[in-house]
Amino acid sequence: MTKTGGSKHQKRVASPRNWVLPRKKHKFAFRADPGPHSRERCIPLGILLRDVLHLAETARELRFILNKKLIKVDGRVVSNPKFPVGLMDVVEIEQLKKAYRILPHELHVLMPFEMKKTAQNSKACQIMNKTTIKNGITQLNLHDGRNILLPKEEGIEQKYNSKDTIIIDLPSQKIANHFPFKEGMYAIIIAGRNVGKHGSIKEFQWRFGPRASTVTLKSPEGTEVQTTPEYIFIIGEKSPWWSAKGADN
C-alpha cells in the first residue's frame, strides 16, 4: 500500500525557526499535532517544558510529568507532549505554583514569560473574523481557533471588529475586556523584523496600491519603529493589560 497523509516525525534541523531547541544535539524532536495554532506559529508543549523551562531531561521524564496531570494550558489539563502552544497561551504548572504567558521574543522565537497569579486566569485573543450563524447570532473567530458567540443584543456586533483584542477569563471564556484596533492603544509586534517590540500606536498610514500600509509604534523609551498592521497585536490601552493586574511581565 502507498503512504497516505503527512509525516509523523520532525527532524530538528528542519524545525520551525521559533522553536527554542539545540538543532544538532539530537536528530528528532516532537512534531506539533494539529490544534489551535499552526505548526509555524507554535511550539510543542514537550519542547517548551523540556528544552525551554528545563523541567525534564528526557522524553521519558517529560511524559511522567504530563501523565500526572500537572500541566494546564489555558485552564485545562493537557497531557499530550505534541500539543501546540502558541501566542498568548497561558501554561500553568500547579505543583510549582508557576504560570507562564507565551509571547514573541526579539530573537524571533516564542518564549514563556512568568506572571503572577493575579493575571494567569485571563488571556488576550485577537479577533480574526466575524460571522453570522443560525438565528442571526454573531460569532467571533479568534486567533487561537476559538469561536465565541455574542449575546443577542441590539448593536453589540458593531462593537467588535477584526484586529480588535478581547480579554477572556479562563477557563470560562467569558469576555472580560475589549481593546479596539486604533491609534493610542498599546500593542506588541508579533512578526517581522521588529518582532517582540512593544509600545503605543502613534500613527496609522493606510495606503492602497503597491505600497503597503504601515503603523508606527512608540516604545516606553521613546524610540519609534514601523511595521505592517498585520503584525500588530493590541494588548492594552496605555500599558499591557496584565500590568494593571500586578503581573511581572
Image: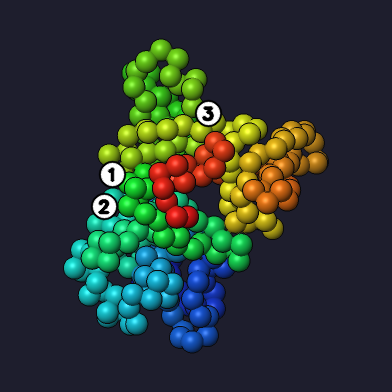
Q: Quadrant of residue 115?
A: bottom left
Q: Residue furthest left?
A: 68
Q: Foreground mark, 3 or 1?
A: 1
Q: Secondary structure at mark 2?
A: strand
**Residue shown at 54% from the left, 42% from the top:** 239
Q: Is residue 24 above or below residue 188?
A: below
Label for residue 237?
none
Q: Position of residue 213 (x, y in %)?
A: 74, 39
In this picture the colour scheme is rainbow
Label for residue 161?
3
- Count the numbered circles shown: 3
Look at label 3 and name its amino acid: Asn
Look at label 1 and name its amino acid: Pro
Q: Quadrant of residue 193?
A: bottom right
**Residue shown at 80% from the left, 41% from the top:** 211
Front-most of residues 124 and 206: 124
Contact between marks 1 and 2 (CB within 8 A): the answer is yes
Q: Earlier in the sequence, mark 3 or mark 1?
A: 3
Q: Earlier in the sequence, mark 1 or mark 2?
A: 2
Q: Is residue 20 above or below residue 190?
A: below
Label for residue 76?
2
Neighbour tally class for label 1: few under 14, some 14-19, many 20 plus, Cα within 10 Å: few
Q: CA distance from mark 3 to mark 1?
A: 23 Å
Q: CA distance from mark 3 to mark 2?
A: 28 Å
- Say if residue 184 shows up in the picture: yes
Q: Position of residue 148 (x, y in %)?
A: 36, 34
**Residue shown at 24% from the left, 57% from the top:** 77
Q: Earlier in the sequence, mark 3 or mark 2?
A: 2
Q: Is residue 52 above or below residue 37?
A: below
- Say if residue 4 shows up in the picture: no
Q: Secondary structure at mark 1?
A: loop
Q: Which residue is the site of mark 1?
A: 171
